[in-house]
Amino acid sequence: MKDIVSDEIRSLTPYPPGKPIEEVEREYGIKGSIKLASNENPLGPSPKAVEAILKSISNLHRYPDGSCYYLKRKLAEYLRVEPEMLIIGNGSNEIIEFVVKTFLGPGEEAVMGNPSFAVYPIIVKASRGKPILVPLKGLVHDLDAMSEAVTAKTRLVFVANPNNPTGTIVTGGDLDRFMGKLPDRVIVVIDEAYREYVTDKEFPNSLEYIKKKRYAVILRTFSKIYGLAGLRIGYGIACKDMISYMQKVRQPFNVNSLAQIAADAALEDEEHLRRSIENNKNEMSRLFREMKDLGFECVPSQANFFLIKVGRGRDVYDGLLRKGVIVRPMDSYGLSEYIRVTVGLPEENERFIETFRRVIKA
């Protein structure tokens, strides 16, 4: 099929999905598995979001609101921005597609950390752009090296903050200096999918860049702390002109009705947000203590997941999997000595700890 597929598409490596729990249990003959692999909120969705969905089921024969009118206004009030500065997508992944399709031409470059969110280079290459991968420094974005990688062909720079898969952040001061080094024409995409979990006071207020008329797009999502991953809804924040151009490449009715309704309700559920933050903070501290007592190094994380340096990461992953504990191996990210673990509920974390002990002794 070489005559009908471009070199860029042939060279792509698809995003590696995890196996469904049901398939894992069937394959290994186990029951009662727990999934700590995909950085989901273990508390589930907001009860208010669930209630709003149930009230709206009978309207599924209607097309969704193509403009996300009410959600945009709720978000605008929440963020203290204008509705015209927002674009809603089928997950924040779709906002990445909007950015690349709108602002990156064939042969132009997008600079990004490595490893970082695996979707960035996939979308860039699929759009005939060129991803420029800059190695992390101490598992943190090397902003100095990233600024040096910018050339006349650079149109985009991606900064995942906190970074996936490492959970590390760049501080406000470091990001300010980085932004100051970049040419005005370069658009900085700041991916803040996990920002609600951050406790570090040095975390940047990225909205200030947009208010200062900097070419930046901020990505956020309802998939993580809001627990709506199965509905796929995220959003982007940028200046009005940039949003208006991205709207030109957005397909009509791209966000389903239930996702819009659930996101609107979830924004009002401060108690669910508080409980999610509290569980993550307390259980992350507990997991770090347990891993330290077992002699394993964890990468400090500002997200709802963390890396553990275990040596042969794939072997430990397989050992946990066979006992019904699903985590994420990191060899596809070039971090074969690590596994990534999502912070779960107390009982899930207890099971992980006990199973981990057995696996490393085997």
Image (cartoon, grey):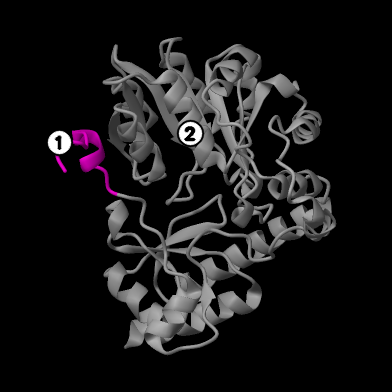
Judge the density around disc 1: few (<14), some (14-19), many (≥20) Cα neighbours within 10 Å.
Answer: few
x 45%, y 48%: residue: 164
Residue 78, relative to residue 40: is it above or below?
above
Please indicate whether residue 249 sits to the left or right of residue 73 in the image: left
Q: Magenta stretch containing residue 156, yes or no? A: no
Q: Magenta stretch containing residue 12, yes or no? A: yes
Q: Residue furthest front?
A: 61
Mark closer to the chain start, 1 or 2: 1
Range of magenta residues: 1-13
In the foreground, 307 or 188: 188
Asked if residue 165 shows in the view, the reply is: yes
x 39%, y 38%: residue: 120
Residue 195, relative to residue 281: is it above or below?
above
Contact, mark 1 vs mark 2 (Cβ under 8 Å): no
Which secondary structure type mostly characterizes the magenta part of the structure?
Answer: loop
Q: Position of residue 14 (x, y in %)?
A: 32, 50
Q: Position of residue 181 (x, y in %)?
A: 41, 15
Judge the density around disc 2: few (<14), some (14-19), many (≥20) Cα neighbours within 10 Å.
Answer: many
Q: Amino acid at mark 1?
A: Asp
Q: Position of residue 308 (x, y in %)?
A: 41, 64
The residue carrying mark 1 is: 3
The residue carrying mark 2 is: 96
Q: Position of residue 360 (x, y in %)?
A: 35, 81
The residue tagged with tag 1: helix, strand or loop?
loop
Please indicate whether residue 136 sits to the left or right of residue 94 in the image: left
Cα distance between the residues tagged 1 and 2: 29 Å
The quadrant in which the N terminus is found is: top left
